[in-house]
């Protein structure tokens, strides 16, 4: 055990140096717009986060993620709001286990409800956009009380 005690101050110093390195976190959110009639709607798609050693690298990484997610958001908008047959098909496939056990009147009511639900979310998609990146320095500066003190030195004090 005594062989490792001289290493404790060195390890504590290394930990303090690694904690002092700057980590910058940048965040942005991606959304898309779609229209139904005269109403324009905005739908939140996803929150993004990138971490790097400096703000420039974090913003660069976030910009790459943002471009990918904007493409996915635009595709998601088309699936959700410009694909009536796909919506109806998906809803029918989720109700298929119980559909055959329903009476004719109940089947008709279900068909009408599914068609009405899908028609309510149909529209035309606009562009996907991302918010401005918000960056924050997440580095933690070690305080004197946070550094490790070897056990033997604690007993001497």
Image (cartoon, grey):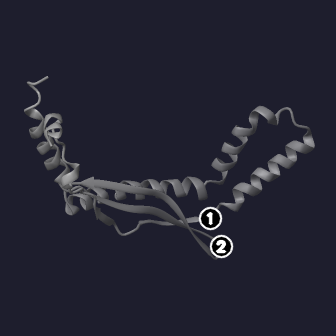
Q: Is residue 128 left or right of residue 148?
A: right
Decide if residue 143 is on the left or right side of residue 116. left
Q: What residue is pinned by disc 2?
A: 37
Of residue 51 and residue 13, the one placed in the foreground of this image is 13
Mark 1 sits on what residue?
A: 123
Nearer to the camera, 151 or 109: 151
Picture quadrant of residue 27: bottom left
Instruction: Relative to 4, say whether 124 is above or below.
Output: below
Residue 144: quarter of image: bottom left
Rendered view: 154 above or below 72: above
- In the picture, measured across the screen, residue 124 lies left or right of residue 113, that is left
Marks 1 and 2: in contact by CB < 8 Å?
yes
For label 1, the SS is loop
Q: 85 or 152, which lies in front? A: 152
Q: Residues within 10 Å of mark 1 (few under 14, many from 20)?
A: many
**Image point (22%, 52%), residue name:** 145
Counting from the top left corner in percent of width and height, residue 148 is at 19, 43
Residue 156: x percent and y percent? Answer: 13, 39
Residue 23 in picture, x, y percent from top left: 23, 55
The residue located at (86%, 42%) in the rendering is 107
Residue 81's disc is none
Q: Can residue 100 be spotted in the picture?
A: yes
In the picture, the quarter occupied by the C terminus is top left
- Asked if residue 82 shows in the view, the reply is no
Q: Quadrant of the N terminus?
A: top left
Say which label, 2 or 1, has the lower sequence index.
2
Residue closest to the eye, 124 or 133 = 133
Helix, strand or loop under label 2: loop
Please tell me how many numbered marks the rendered image carries: 2
Residue 7: percent from left, percent from top: 9, 33
Q: State the separation of the CA atoms marked 2 and 1.
A: 7 Å
Instruction: Count neighbours of disc 2 (C-alpha within 10 A) and say few if under 14, some if 14 to 19, many if 20 or more.
Output: few
């Amino acid at each position: 055990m005594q062989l490792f005690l001289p290493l404790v101050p060195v390890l504590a110093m290394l930990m303090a140096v690694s904690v002092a390195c700057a980590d910058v976190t940048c965040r942005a959110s991606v959304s898309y717009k779609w229209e139904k009639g005269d109403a324009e709607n905005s739908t939140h798609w996803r929150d993004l986060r990138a971490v790097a050693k400096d703000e420039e690298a974090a913003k660069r990484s976030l910009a790459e993620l943002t471009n990918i997610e904007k493409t996915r958001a635009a595709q998601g908008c088309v699936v959700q709001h410009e694909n009536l047959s796909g919506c109806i098909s998906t809803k029918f496939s989720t109700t298929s286990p119980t559909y055959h056990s329903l009476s004719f009147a109940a089947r008709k009511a279900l068909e009408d409800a599914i068609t009405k639900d899908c028609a309510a979310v149909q529209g035309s998609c606009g562009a996907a956009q991302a918010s401005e990146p918000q960056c924050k320095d997440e580095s933690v500066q070690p305080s004197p009380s946070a550094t490790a003190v070897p056990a033997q030195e604690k007993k001497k004090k």
